[in-house]
Image (cartoon, rainbow, N blue to C red):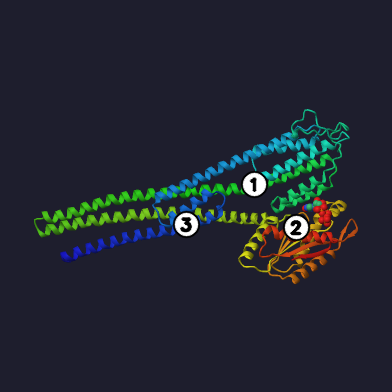
Amino acid sequence: MNDNSVGQAQLDTLQKKLDSAIDSRRTLEEDFKTQSTLLIQFISKLSLVSKGVDLELDNRLAKLRVLFTKSAPIADIENSIAIITKLLQQHAITNEKNIAQMHQRFNIAGESLQKVNGLPNDLRRNLRELLSETKSTKDALIQYVPLLSQLLEFYINALSAKEKTATNGLLTTPNNAGDSAQTTLDTSSDNNSNTASTFELDESLLEKISVTLSALNLSQAHTNQLLAIKKKLMGDTTNKEIVNHFLEIFDVIVAEFKNEQNNAKSFLTSLSDTLTSVQLAVKETLETQKSSQLANDKINVVLQKQLVDMTGTVEKALSLDQVKLDINDKLQKIAGTLEAKSKIEQQSQLALSQKLTKMAEKVAQLEEKSRVFEEKLAEQQIKNMQDALTKLANRAAFDDYFAKAMVRFQHRPFELALVVIDIDDFKKINDTYGHSAGDKTLQVIANTIQKHVSKDVFVGRYGGEEFVLIYSQTAETDLINELNTINKQVARLPFKFKNNKVSITLSIGATHIRTDDNIHLAFERADEAMYKAKSQGKNQVIYSK
Ligand SMILES: Nc1nc2c(ncn2[C@@H]2O[C@H](COP(=O)(O)OP(=O)(O)OP(=O)(O)O)[C@@H](O)[C@H]2O)c(=O)[nH]1
């Protein structure tokens, strides 16, 4: 082999090593790009899930997504993740504060009840247990605070209402009781506190409680429990039973708080944990890159020096043979240095790809959790728009649907009609056969209406014994025919309460929306038509032009 071919072979080896170093670098960059895309997708999904929870969090996540999309410097990304982690921590603190406040209120109300004289022993024991349990665990969801406060208010009202009407000494209030929570249950007429005293609940109060309970959107299991308690409450006749059932209602609501809170808490905790570990992984990656950059820089210096040496060798050489020998020697050294360089790059690539794999696993785990949370949120949203008793759309869903229909109508008018349906003499059903019979009646009538309306008609429970329908493409005659059919179907329902056959009828008011209407005017017209049906003898449909 002549000198030229030895030199050429060395240069070829050098070229190959350089090529392989360039390839490793490219693979590294591609891997990083793939993982960045994965993170961008994850952050998008995360933004969707946490949307509306906190405006600032929404914005920060959007910014982080942009940073990833435009491959911003890793230090900026690290900074952005640190801010998001901090936000999540602040969120957790605010949440804790709200929960603490909620508990304080809960305990104040509970302790007031404890001060009531003459409470039965088992009730006192249950109450003590409930209070000590809620004191230590501090569980509650802020969205339920107004409902729970309302319920507590009913409870206190129930006791003080009896104060005023108690003429038989069953309930009295001590003269110094300035605080409504100091209401005293006095069983002086019967000193045995276990003996049940008569306590007739104010009907409007029961109705308010019933409506409040229906407005609570709890899980299916808790809703069933509440319905069962509500049923028992309607048949209660003694103080002891009523108070016990109120406490059972609290128990169900507290249990629901716990479930909901645990779900949200565990999601936020794992979100925060994952972001922290992503932040750590990014930091480590940055450090790995920095140290591999340092090692590379050092090698480059060595290479540089070796190349300079080689030039010096040629300049200083006395003979061609010596040049050959020296260059050969230097080329060996350069090849060794390049090999070391490529090894460092491979190691750094391996370390980086291991970290990215770990990160991707974490992201996948969190994606799964956020999917479950997303499903729960969607379920909750459906429940928020549904009436718990009849399973029809509720008032909120109606308001939303009708408002959107009105916007479409104002954009381009079409046959948009609104119908208000009210059950006739419904109070009589409640008064004669009890509230449970009334509830059952509402369910059966809701099903019958739903069964006999055309497809695509919106059916909702407006409240109490009132239903609303929205028709989107039905002309006057067809609308009146369909409403008459519904009316007849309901009148034919074979209701039987306490062995009495009962016929229940409807009063129905309907109208088409006019171009000069607004939501309020249209509703009033349909409502007036319904009242006209009532005043003209009930059990009929009135259409208002
Ligand atoms: N069982 C039950 N009753 C309810 C519910 N919501 C409202 N009510 C009752 O519905 C009744 C409505 O009575 P009113 O408004 O006097 O009307 P009505 O007896 O139907 O009389 P007309 O409208 O004149 O035919 C009241 O007794 C309410 O307590 C509920 O969710 N369940």
Question: Label 3 is placed on what type of residue?
Answer: Ile
> Relative to residue 522, is residue 359 drawn left or right?
left
Question: Label 2 is placed on what type of residue?
Answer: Thr
Give the residue drawn at x 76%, y 67%. 452
Q: Single out the residue that lies furthest toward the right.
A: 499
Quarter the C terminus occupies: bottom right
Front-most of 282 and 110? 110
Question: Label 1 is placed on what type of residue?
Answer: Gln
> Relative to residue 353, is residue 151 drawn left or right?
right
For label 2, the residue is 390
For label 3, the residue is 40
> Relative to residue 232, is residue 325 drawn left or right?
left
Front-most of 261 and 485? 485
Q: What separation in Å lies between label 3 and label 1 (alpha carbons)?
A: 32 Å
Mark 2 nearby-residue class (10 Å; few <14, some 14–19, many ≥20): many
Give the residue drawn at x 66%, y 63%. 516
For label 1, the residue is 143
Mark 3 nearby-residue class (10 Å; few <14, some 14–19, many ≥20): many
Q: What separation in Å lies between label 2 and label 1 (alpha carbons)?
A: 23 Å
